[in-house]
Image (cartoon, helix red, strand yellow):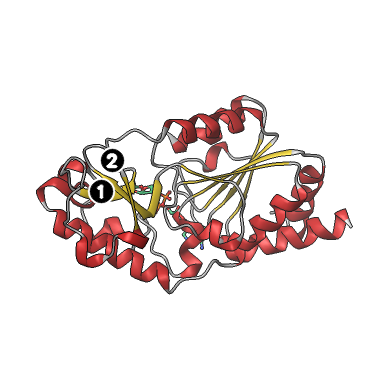
């Protein structure tokens, strides 16, 4: 088996020749910030039913329960900070001419770390909207005490502005993500189980268009067999190592 240093050096060789890189992140990149993933053994979906907590029907049948889960997640988020994985991506963005960051996460930690243009495929936990007319309600004017209040325009229930199972992804975001997957020379899949579509399709689009596929994930996933190289490490550990070697070579 190739030594880690050699593997990183080989990747850096490729990265140095790339001017267009697309990154897809999932819950795993925020794990080292103390945010739970979904499908790991201790992840949310081992304890809760996604149909109850992450679907429109689930929300309509028990909005208090769903809101209490989102409020809990927001509370965890407020005491969380971006980790060295998020921060390394901020540095890559500065060096690479066209750097496209696509995330399935709703936690905003990429933006908090300083990433400039983050494509949020699954919405954001810090935004809310009316379930009927989609009117936005931001957290600054909408705190926990008002959770079951209704839209002042149409009287619809206010819900988190995230994408639930059975719902379409925001059109502009998924379109941009697909274009960036088509155009990139190198595609990173970081901290995602690659189980949820259409996000899980992005690496295949990139591969079919000739991109080199890198997977960063301590565990084997549905994508692993398609990846050109895998780093079986936590992203907060391996991304700074890749960045360090990359920055040594560009200066
Ligand atoms: P998952 O929970 O499905 O997968 C998280 C992945 O991160 C797993 O493959 C882990 O092995 C990996 N992982 C754990 N710790 C890591 C670390 N420190 N560094 C790198 N990888 C690590 O999360 P997602 O793939 O993001 O959607 O899930 C996709 C969507 O399913 C979510 O956006 C959410 C969920 O249901 C909705 O709620 C609609």
Judged from the image, the secondary structure of the residue bearing numbered disc 1 is loop
In the foreground, 162 or 13: 162
Is residue 218 in view? no
Q: Is mark 1 within 8 Å of ligand 1?
A: yes
Disc 2 residue lies near ligand 1 with CB under 8 A: yes
Camera-nearest residue between 174 and 26:
174
Q: What residue lies at 45% left-to-right and 38% top-to-bottom?
A: 199
Question: Which image quadrant: the C terminus?
Answer: bottom right
> Residue 163: percent from the left, percent from the top?
34, 43
- Judged from this view, the residue extending furthest toward the bottom is 79
| Element on which disc 2 rests | loop
- The spot of residue 42 in percent (x, y) is 33, 64
As rendered, which of 38 and 78 lies closer to the eye? 78
Q: Position of residue 144 (x, y in %)?
A: 25, 66
Q: Residues within 10 Å of mark 1 (few under 14, many from 20)?
A: some
Judged left or right of residue 139, residue 51 is left
Numbered mark located on residue 165 in the image? 2
> Can see residue 144?
yes
Residue 154 - label:
none
Taking 120 as reference, is 8 left or right? right
- The total number of labels drawn is 2
Residue 222 in percent (x, y) is at: 45, 41
Quickly name the residue at label 1.
54
Q: What residue is at 49 percent from the left and 69 percent from the top?
A: 33
Up/down of 43 relative to 15, above or below: below
From mark 1 to mark 2, how far is it between C-alphas?
6 Å
The answer to whether the residues at label 1 and label 2 have Cβ atoms under 8 Å apart is yes
Q: Residue at x 25, y 62 (%)?
A: 69
Image quarter where the N terminus lies is bottom right
Please identify the quarter of the rendering in which residue 130 is found.
top left
């Amino acid at each position: 088996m190739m030594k880690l240093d050699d593997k990183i050096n080989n990747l850096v060789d490729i990265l140095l020749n790339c001017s267009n890189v697309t990154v897809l992140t999932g819950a795993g990149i925020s794990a080292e910030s103390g945010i739970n993933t979904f499908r790991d053994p201790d992840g949310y979906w081992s304890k809760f039913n996604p149909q109850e907590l992450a679907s429109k029907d689930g929300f309509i049948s028990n909005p208090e329960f769903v809101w209490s889960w989102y409020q809990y997640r927001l509370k965890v988020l407020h005491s969380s900070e971006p980790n060295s994985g998020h921060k390394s991506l901020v540095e890559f963005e500065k060096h690479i001419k066209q750097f496209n960051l696509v995330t399935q996460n709703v936690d905003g930690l990429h933006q908090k770390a300083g990433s400039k243009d983050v494509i949020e495929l699954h919405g954001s936990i810090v935004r809310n909207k009316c379930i009927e007319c989609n009117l936005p309600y931001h957290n600054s004017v909408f705190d926990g005490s008002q959770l079951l209040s209704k839209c002042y325009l149409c009287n619809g229930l206010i819900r988190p502005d995230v994408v639930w199972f059975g719902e379409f992804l925001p059109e502009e975001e998924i379109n941009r993500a697909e274009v960036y997957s088509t155009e990139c020379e190198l595609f990173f899949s970081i901290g995602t189980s690659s189980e949820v579509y259409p996000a899980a399709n992005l690496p295949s689009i990139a591969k079919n268009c000739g991109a080199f596929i890198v997977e960063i994930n301590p565990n084997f996933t549905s994508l692993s067999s398609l990846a050109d190289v895998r780093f079986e490490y936590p992203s907060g550990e391996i991304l700074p190592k890749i960045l360090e070697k990359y920055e040594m070579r560009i200066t």
